[in-house]
Image (cartoon, coloured by chain):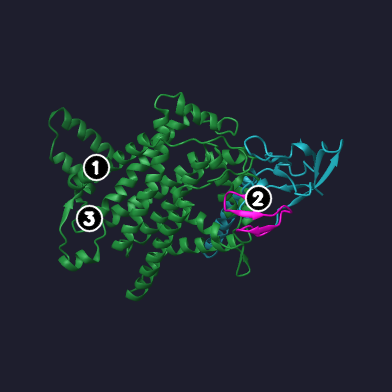
Amino acid sequence: MTSSGNSVPRRKWLLRVLCGAVGVTAAVIAYPVLAFLRPRRTGGALGVEMLAPYRVDQLTLDADGHWPAPFDFGGKPCILIKKTDGTVKAFNAVCTHLDCTVEFRAPRRDIFCNCHNGVFDENGRNVSGPPPRPLEEYKVTLRGESGREEIIVSRD
Amino acid sequence: MSHATEDDAPATGRNGRVREFFTERFGLGTLLELGEKKRVPIHRTTPFYFLGGMALFLVVVQAASGVMLSLYYKPSPDQAFESVQAIMTEVDFGWLLRSVHAWGGTLLIAVLILHLLTTYMMRAYRRPREFTWVTGILLLGLFMAFGFSGYLLPWNQLAFFATRVGTAIVGAVPLVGDELLVWARGGENVTGDTLARFYALHVAVFPLLAIGLLGVHLFLVQKHGMSVPDAATNLHGNRVPSMPFVPHFLLRDAVGWYLALAVLALLAAVFPWELGEKAEPFGSAPEGIKPEWYFLFMFQALRELPAHFLGMEGEMLGVLFFGFCGFVVLLIPFLDRGTRTRRVLNGLAVVSVVFVIAMSIWGFLE
């Protein structure tokens, strides 16, 4: 039926269609697979504002010399510190170097990261060691009886 | 061909008939022939050939002990730590199995590094063995990834923060870093999803990759035979003395396996691997956060890098630097092109080894 002259282009055309179809099949399978592997979004919008688990008078070293531990604020650890003048500050406790969680060293009046010896001052500014940026600061609102105020942490 | 020889020599006795039955059906003749043909050159550095066999032995130990641990381990943040604790305190010999698996991983990396260095010194990567080297380097990278993913599984403080740091380093890769970090962690933070991801990689994805890569590596070793160092060739010309692999070298190899087993048993029993404290995802990082020793030099280098350097963030520079070094190591067979380049490579190799050892000691002492 067909002359040998056009059977080769036809074969080529068929091969191309076949490859195309297999390619489309692979893409149709790959899309949901990749979308499945892509991490799901969680908790990003939550935690815009919350009541901290400590009151102002609880911001002090405990009997073992530990400062109140960071708490979960919208999926990130939040650390509360009390400056020498009594001001309460809240920071995202994730170190800006390589994501360790920082701690407040009350006797030294600084914020320290144990992983790579990064040091921040009481205002969250990176003062020594490898951290490239200051800590992210959250807004602090106090309410209630003076001296025993509740602490509300919020971010824009 | 093999069929004819079997016909020529009819099997006698029951053992002979059984052997003939399987030989005919599985083509065992080819395997036997391969085994008989394989010879190992004898020279001053012949003992270096044992290291590959020791590594293979430890891989088998890791696979076996890993499968056993998986019978009791539960990969979720609520249960991971407790299940490892139960393995160590309630399951008979559980402490030993976990210790063997943890020490086995560490020993495997150590043997692989020696295997790498001795292979480099003997220049066994020369044509046509370039891809034996390349697959070997990829295997070393893969086993380090095994170590990194396995480190998180007990879900203790050390593992949790080491994983935070390790994955944050991935995040320092230019352009695609943020996206890579999210893929590696299974989200923005290290959570239960991270643990599930690492578990799947550790027990399913990496083992499959290892089998594939190891298959190619071993096939290439069989195909090309053992490489003979220049020194031996210069001494004996084309008549380097050799011994048959079966049984002469195999029995010596077995001594290497026994040696690895002895060291492993000693370490596992005398220094049981510790579990530490359960991870507190929102607590401050404790003191003494350290990765496994084979990542320590990178950890220490990143710790000492300034925050900003050459207009880049320090860690980004570090990641680019170590990535480039890894790439150079991978391509060594193609970079060794004559005496002059070899001298440069040797110089770089000495500097790298000294750097790694010095940084590791520094990191260990801090």
Label 1: chain? B
Q: Amino acid at mark 2?
A: Arg
Please identify, in this view, whether the residue under mark 2 or under mark 3 is nearer the observer.
2
Find out whether the residues at labels 2 and 3 contact each other: C-beta distance under 8 Å: no
Q: Colour of chain B?
A: green
Mark 1 or 2, closer to the camera: 2
State which region is magenta.
Answer: A112-133
Residue type, label 1: Ala
Instruction: Please give the label number shown on residue A108.
Output: 2
Taking the image as shown, residue B156 lies to the left or right of residue A133, namely: left
Which is more N-terminal, label 3 or label 1?
3
Question: Does dot 3 land on a helix, a strand or a loop?
Answer: helix
Percent coordinates x, y for residue B278 in the rendering: 56, 34
Q: Quadrant of residue B270?
A: top left
Secondary structure found at label 2? helix
**Residue placed at 71% from the left, 44% from the top?**
A79
Quadrant position of residue A67: top right
**For the residues marked 2 and 3, what is the alpha-carbon distance in whole angstroms?**
59 Å
The circle drawn on residue B254 is 1
Residue beneath the point at 20% across and 51% down: B37
Within 10 Å of disc 2 (Cα), the crowding (few <14, some 14-19, many 20+) is few
Residue B46 marker: 3
Seen from the viewer's position, the closer of residues A34 and A139 is: A139
Chain letter of disc 2 in the image: A
